[in-house]
Image (cartoon, rainbow, N blue to C red):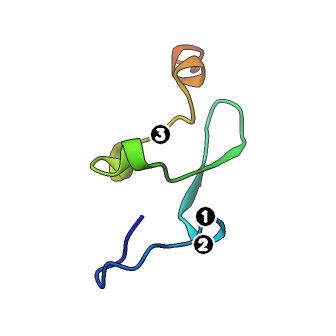
């Protein structure tokens, strides 16, 4: 993850969220760069097992 000044952020300083299915924290990944605001689940498995 890069800041506005193009500096790389250390993994320990990256944003994180709590998965509503497994209640575990997960952090930002490069593949979620464009849609981090809409990411809810930590994995495909948690998304499939979500409570409706």
Q: Nearer the viewer, mark 3 or mark 1?
A: 1
When asked about the image quadrant of residue 32, the answer is top left
Name the residue tied to disc 3: 40
Residue sitting farthest toward the front? 7
User: Marks 1 and 2, Cα distance to the nearest angstrom?
Assistant: 5 Å
Closer-to-camera residue (22/34): 34
Name the residue tied to disc 2: 13
Examine the rendered structure and indicate whether residue 19 appears above or below residue 37. above
Q: Is residue 4 left or right of residue 49?
A: left
- Classify mark 2: helix, strand or loop: helix
**Residue drawn 61% across and 37% down?**
20
Closer-to-camera residue (50/3): 3
**Residue drawn 58% across and 71% down?**
10
Examine the rendered structure and indicate whether residue 15 appears above or below residue 27. below
Name the residue tied to disc 1: 11
Q: Is residue 48 left or right of residue 36?
A: right
| Among the two numbered marks 3 and 2 on one chain, the one whose residue lies closer to the N terminus | 2
**Residue drawn 48% across and 49% down?**
29
User: Marks 3 and 1, Cα distance to the nearest angstrom?
Assistant: 19 Å
Which class describes the residues within 10 Å of circle 3: few (<14), some (14-19), or many (20+)?
Answer: some
């Amino acid at each position: 993850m890069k800041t506005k000044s193009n500096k790389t952020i250390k993994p320990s300083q990256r944003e994180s969220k709590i998965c509503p299915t497994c209640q575990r924290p997960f952090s930002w990944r490069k593949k979620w760069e464009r849609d981090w605001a809409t990411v809810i689940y930590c994995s495909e498995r948690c998304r499939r097992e979500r409570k409706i």
